[in-house]
Image: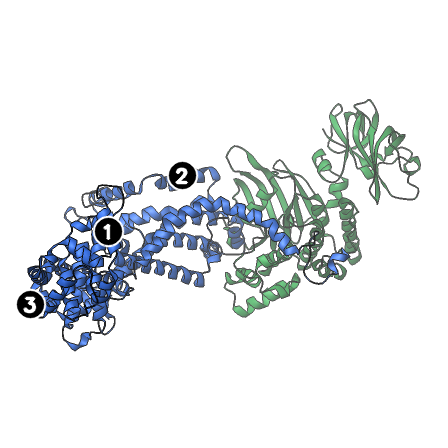
Chain colours: A green, B blue
Amino acid sequence: MPSERNLTNHETRHSRPAQVNRLRPAAEFALLLIKQRRKRAEATGEPLLADIKSDSAFVEFERVQKSYDGENLVVKDLNLSMPKGEFLTMLGPSGSGKTTCLMMLAGFETATHGDIRLAGKSINNIPPHKRGIGMVFQNYALFPHMTVAENLSFPLEVRKMGKSDREAKVKRALDMVQMGSFAGRRPAQLSGGQQQRIALARALVFEPELVLMDEPLGALDKQLRETLQFEITNLAHDLGITVVYVTHDQTEALTMSDRVAVFDDGRIQQLAPPDQLYEAPENSFVAQFIGENNTLEGVVKEIQNGHALVQLDDGELITAKPVNVSAVGERTRVSIRPERVEYKPDRLSDQAHMLDAEVLEFIYMGDVFRTRLRVAGSDSFVMKCRNAPDQARLKPGEKLKIGWLPEDCRALDA
Amino acid sequence: MADITDQSGPMLAADGRPLKSSLNRALRRQKLRALALIAPLLIFIMVTFIAPIADMLFRSVENQIVSDTLPRTTETLADWDADSGEIPPPEVFEALYTDIFVAQERKLHTRLGSRLNYELSGVSSLFRKSGRRVDDIGEVYQDQFEDLDDFWKDSETWNALMGSDDWNAAQIQWDEGSDDPQPPFEPREEITGLLPQTAEIFQIFADFVQREDEDNLADEDPWELVYSALYTDLIQTPDLSGYGGPGSAELLVAMSAVPDFETVDHAAAFEDIDEDWHSIEVWQTIQTYSPDFTSGYFLNAVDMKKSPDGPEMRPDDEQIYIKLFIRTLIMSLAITGSCILLGYPVAWILANLPARTANLLMILVLLPFWTSLLVRTSAWKVMLQQQGVVNDTLVWLGLVADDSRLALINNQTGTIIAMTHILLPFMILPLYSVMKTIPPSYLRAAKSLGATNWTAFWRVYFPQSVPGIGAGSILVFILAIGYYITPELVGGTTGTFISNRIAYHISSSLNWGLAAALGTILLALVLGLYWAYDRIVGIDNVKLGG
């Protein structure tokens, strides 16, 4: 990926890499990226890591529970298996237990129940310093009293490595993150992005097979964050290391990961590659949490041949794809992505069901038009249309008919 | 914009004044307000703290008492060669007579005696004795003048002779019972020229009677010293022919009579008072301490003394201060060290506990601050004495035999234990506030990089807590080095500090000069150590918090 690697040189001058279009919605961009990756994988004949169903799991959580106070479980029954070389992101709102999972893996917290295995061996009783796991911390945790080179040399020194080996490895690691000329500086003399690179280099310099990252880009500005997202992903894939990445930023998760584990309430809500996560959320939480989403509430009237008939609360009947509804009469939330909503009949297939809608608000966003509609009693129904020559700019109060493909409309738990 | 940036010369503000002065004017009000806010404290500190300290420190070199009390003696003694092995010439004794006479009238001779006694023991009693018997010396002349003529007996005739006409008139007019001040004595100019010494001494006498005793000069008979001075003047046969004022006839008679007078050998007279006056050592001491400023107190404070050959060490059995300084330093270091050892783990626990528990424990750390220092120190007396709590417990546990109880108090151990306890909060607080700012992620990072608990602590945590150790150590050490009350109470003889010696010289021996010199050395020592600390560790590395 030479073109992407070159980005780093631009970043230091704070110019904007041409490939990253600020105006493109992040989620869509992430999808584009994973599709590119898929295409590349097909071209080379290598299977995409996310698609491998590996028996030889590298990192495994088995029935892991964690409680701090003995009354509430922060992590409830966590089961997770990662193959070697995977980039897995733990995504979730704060307090969802994702950081606790990472800390248990690193060894700074002990699991209350269950087993955590690394390369087949249980590491529950191995202290953190013997686990050989690299870690990048939220605030980098670069040792302020050491220079950059000393910081990088530290993990090698505690491994009793010879001086010349150390120097060679430190140099290589610094070159890897394009920070070769900063060896003599103190962390306080570096910018946030530079510190982040050093932290990354330090976590990688002793060549761990597993690297954990705890919201490493959280403190950076948006522009720098996007550049570093590329760098980290590329570095991880180039080196073939396994990465567990924790973030609450869904864009970051979608852009960087092979698979994303969406956490909520101490459980993994869905574990899937980014495109599946976005396009096929398995429950309402994931649908709401990832990307923008329209929700219409109703009751299941009929389930047949992979189609569910849902009666919305205003009496309208629509067809949806049943995802986690099983019984007739069950309440459901129907989820439709805003960009899958159309108002031009010629863009829809014949079976598409049309609903009445009234324009409440029209927002011009450059690449897209975002229209807020009143649909089936809901005032927060959003439609996104690509800015194309034939696209009309709707006016508030306008009445129109909207529709979508039944397979884009997913009936989820209420 | 262009018209501002294009101009040459200083930047101007909108009203055409230079921008710099405009800015200064704008800031002046703020500065004045800031100054006004601190002014009360500043004035308070200056008056009650800085000025007395400066005055005290000045006493360490000030030595005017010798030349003030013995002005003539020190002047004539300047030419005397101490190495000659001979006692000073007769003029010195004559001057000494004059000086001691005046001093004993003013009751200053004992103070000088005490002052010189610091340098040579025995001088105090020598001066006291001389003060008592110095009157006898002058009586020889007084008797002979009075035998010559009754004129010399009467204070009024003396006043008429010595004082100017105007003054005499005013003095007679003056009503002693009234609130008006006594007219100050004015000498008669002719007499001042003819009888200079008599005039000088009479002036001193008159000033003393009028100002210090506040008596009526008309009622006071002149000092014996005045007669001696008159003799000295007349024996030189001044030309009295031009003088026709009061007592001119009596003066002529006296002048013709004086060559036949019985004379006084001052040297012999002083030897008669005390044979120490013929000791070279006494005169050496007086000569050495005649200058207005002396390094004597400082030399004394480092166990040295002045000698004719320059400063030299005192005999071994008189050396105490250097040992005491070293002991103070070593014990302060020991106290600082034990505070670090005891305080560091406590601060660490406090910094790593949840806030609520930490606050509770912090109150326990601060609790000693709310108890009187004396109470705490007294408590240690109870705890540490031979029949005290600690010894009882050790005996009960069988660690110490009942007949060999440990001596934990009235020695260095007692001072170190009690002061470590008292100063411990000063170590814990800065340590805590520094440790509080070290995020736990550093330790985690170190461990994730493969460091054992100890390596992570020693290589990563400890270096970052050094500023706290520095701040705590400076606080504790500087407080300890000047500590007084605790060593005084629990230190016995071996556990006292230099400050106890300073206090002794301030309040018991009253040798303020030496106390000031010791204090100055202590201050210099602390500043020197502070400077060294700054050079080695860097004062920027000291953090008291955040």
Q: Quadrant of residue A147?
A: bottom right
- Three-letter code for the amino acid on which mark 2 is drawn: Ile
Q: CA distance from mark 1 to mark 2?
A: 80 Å
| A200 over B368 or under it: above or below | below
Residues tagged 1 and 2 counted as in contact (Cβ below 8 A): no
Q: Position of residue A47 (x, y in %)?
A: 74, 53
Query: Which labelled disc corresponds to residue B363?
Result: 2
Q: Quadrant of residue A388?
A: top right
Query: Which labelled disc corresponds to residue B169?
Result: 1
Q: Residue at x 77, y 41 (%)?
A: A279
Query: Which labelled disc corresponds to residue A211?
Result: none
- In this view, which residue lies farthest toward the bottom? B84
- Three-letter code for the amino acid on which mark 1 is drawn: Ala
Task: Using the image as rendered, state which of residue A164 and residue B102 is in the foreground.
Answer: B102
**Residue B379 appears left or right of A79:** left
Q: Quadrant of residue B325?
A: bottom left
Neighbourhood count class around disc 3 (C-alpha, 10 Å): few under 14, some 14–19, many 20 upward: few
Q: In the image, which is nearer the foreground, mark 3 or mark 1? A: 1
Q: In the image, which is nearer the foreground, mark 3 or mark 2? A: 3
Q: Quadrant of the N terminus of chain B?
A: bottom right
Does the image show residue B495? no
The subunit letter for the residue under badge 3 reads B
**Residue B359 appears left or right of A167:** left
Task: Give the residue pinned by disc 3.
Answer: B262
Does the image show residue A16? yes
Q: Position of residue B166 (x, y in %)?
A: 26, 54
Q: Secondary structure at mark 3?
A: loop
The subunit letter for the residue under badge 2 reads B
